[in-house]
Amino acid sequence: MSDSEKEDDPKTTGPVDNAWSLEIPSFKPEDNPNRLLQESSFATLFPKYREQYLKEHWPLIQKALDDYAIKAELDFIEGSMTVKTTRKTWDPYIIIKARDMIKLMSRSVPFEQAVRVLQDDISSDIIKISSFVRNREKFVKRRQRLIGPKGCTLKSIELLTNCYVLVQGQTVAALGPYRSLPLVRRIVEDTMKNIHPIYNIKALMIKRELAKDPKLKNENWERFLPKFNSKNINKRKQPKNKKEKKPYTPFPPPQQESKIDKMISTGEYFLNEQQKRAKKKREQDIKHQEAEKRRQERRAQAFVPPEEASKEKKEEKDDINLDEFKKKVNNALKKRSAKS
């Protein structure tokens, strides 16, 4: 078998431990000699304050896209940027890259960074952060926490992930390798969910150091990573007098009795005015008597004598031993006579 036949044979490849280490071959014009059959285009709007910057850098944008045979148009009347494929375009995916580039340019990303997205190993991600927090004050505080004092938190995220990150309005634009973009998205989303970015930054630093140790390469790293403990562990306080829910019944509640129905049930409806006044007077007299009785009981409590505590008399012991008493007296007399 000749050398040329060996080169034409397909190479057998096995499983790869680290797929990120593989080099992606570049797509060249020779790989697609027939070019594209149909034109594709994408357009995006840009704010008014970006008009001057885009006007100054538009020749550079056109030059960068001409290298990939992409046509770019700028419309100041509608405030839009458009990218289109041409007959010379050979890469079918470059139009998606060009779309991402004009999106980044419209979101205040500088041209020097946005043009990097045209590379094969670089991608972009635009993270919407306005839907995480409803309160405007909390949203501003958490967004500022992501930036950090003098932008130090954002700079540390860029150094650890090798990505360019820009916080603008209600979105965060990230630009970098495919492997690092999910890390940036996770940090941004956790920050907007009230998890401080220092936890994720510390975890990335620890993982970077652990990856250098071949002994810990295939072990679980959970014991080394910092754990976030939420302060809102306590459940919502329950009311003291909690109302119990009644069992569900498909039938409506019984109709309440009207005033006339109550009078009929008690027999008051059939009484004349004189009888009603007499009945009302009797009820008032009964209430007065009960109130007077309770009043007399309260007054009588002041004249009830308090109970005296019984004192137990201590019984004195009258038993005296005469023999011991005589011995003590004799000893005392002997001592006195000896002294004299």
Image (tube, rainbow, N blue to C red):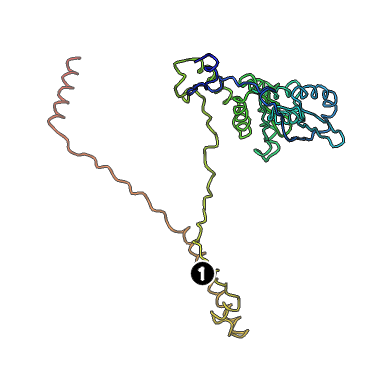
Name the side, left or right, on which 246 lies relative to 133.
Answer: left
Residue at screen point 16% across, 25% down: 328
Q: Quadrant of the C terminus?
A: top left
Kind of residue at badge 1: Glu
* In the image, residue 165 above or below residue 275: above
Residue at screen point 55% across, 37% down: 232
- Image location (x, y in percent) of residue 214: 46, 15
242 or 166: which is nearer to us? 166
Instruction: Examine the image and state in which quarter residue 24 appears.
Output: top right
* In the image, residue 242 above or below residue 294: above
Is disc 1 surrounded by few (<14), some (14 to 19) or many (20+) residues within 10 Å?
Answer: few
Residue at screen point 63% across, 20% down: 162
- Image location (x, y in percent) of residue 96: 70, 31
- Image location (x, y in percent) of residue 268: 57, 81
Farthest right residue in view: 77
7 or 103: which is nearer to us? 7
Residue matched to label 1? 290
163 or 252: which is nearer to us? 163
* Label 1 element class: helix
Farthest left residue in view: 323
